[in-house]
Amino acid sequence: MGMRGIVPAFRNPSGLSPDRAGHRIRQGYQALLSPNYLAQDESEATNNHRQAELFYLQKQIQSQTPMVIVLEDGEHVEGTIEWYDRQSLKVRGRARTLVYKSAIKYMYKLGDAGNGP
C-alpha cells in the first residue's frame, strides 16, 4: 500500500500538480528576492518617507511652529521654518539660518516635553 494510503493527497486549488505548484511558489520567492523587486520596494519606501517629511515640514511652516533643530555636532538652532527644499531648511530665529538636512540629527517643537530621541 505504501505511504500514499496514509498521507492525504496534496490538494491544490489551482489544479496544478504538486511539482508544478511548488515550481510556481519558488518562482514567487525568486521574484521577491530579485534586485528589481528590492529596488522598487526601496524606492517606494524612500518616496513614502519623503512624502511624510514634506507633509510634516509644510504643516510646521503653515502653523509657524517654533522649532528646535539639533545638529549632528550638538548645536541647537531655534526658530520657525520659513521654507525648505530637497537639501536644506531656512530657519528664522534670532538670525536667519540655512541648515543642510544632512547636518540635522533630529528636531522637535519648542516646549515639547520629550526633547529628542
Image (spheres, rainbow, N blue to C red):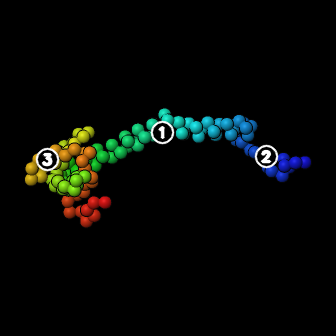
Q: Of the residues shown, which amino acid type is indicated by label 1?
A: Leu
Percent x, y of residue 38 = 48, 39
Question: The residue under label 2 is which amino acid type?
Answer: Ala
Residue 2: x %, y % from top left: 87, 48
At 18% from the left and 48% from the top, the residue drawn is 81
Mark before the other along the chain sequence, 2 or 3: 2
On screen, residue 33 versus residue 2, left or right, reads left
Q: Picture quarter containing residue 14?
A: top right
Residue beneath label 2, please?
A: 9
Disc 3 to disc 1: CB gap under 8 Å: no
Pick the residue in front: 77 or 85: 77
Q: CA distance from mark 2 to mark 1?
A: 36 Å
Around disc 2, counting alpha carbons within 10 Å, would you say few (fewer than 14), some (14 to 19), or many (20 or more)? few
- Looking at the image, which residue is at 16% across and 48% down? 91
Marks 3 and 1, Cα distance to the nearest angstrom? 38 Å
Quickly name the residue at label 1. 38
Residue, disc 3: 97
Residue most toward the front?
73
The extreme top residue here reads: 36
Decide: is 30 above or below 96: above
Task: Name the quadrant containing residue 42.
Answer: top left
> 107 and 64: which one is in front?
107
Looking at this view, name the residue that lies furthest to the bottom: 113
- Which one is earlier in the sequence, the residue at label 3 or at label 1? 1
- Asked if residue 80 lies left or right of residue 51, the reply is left
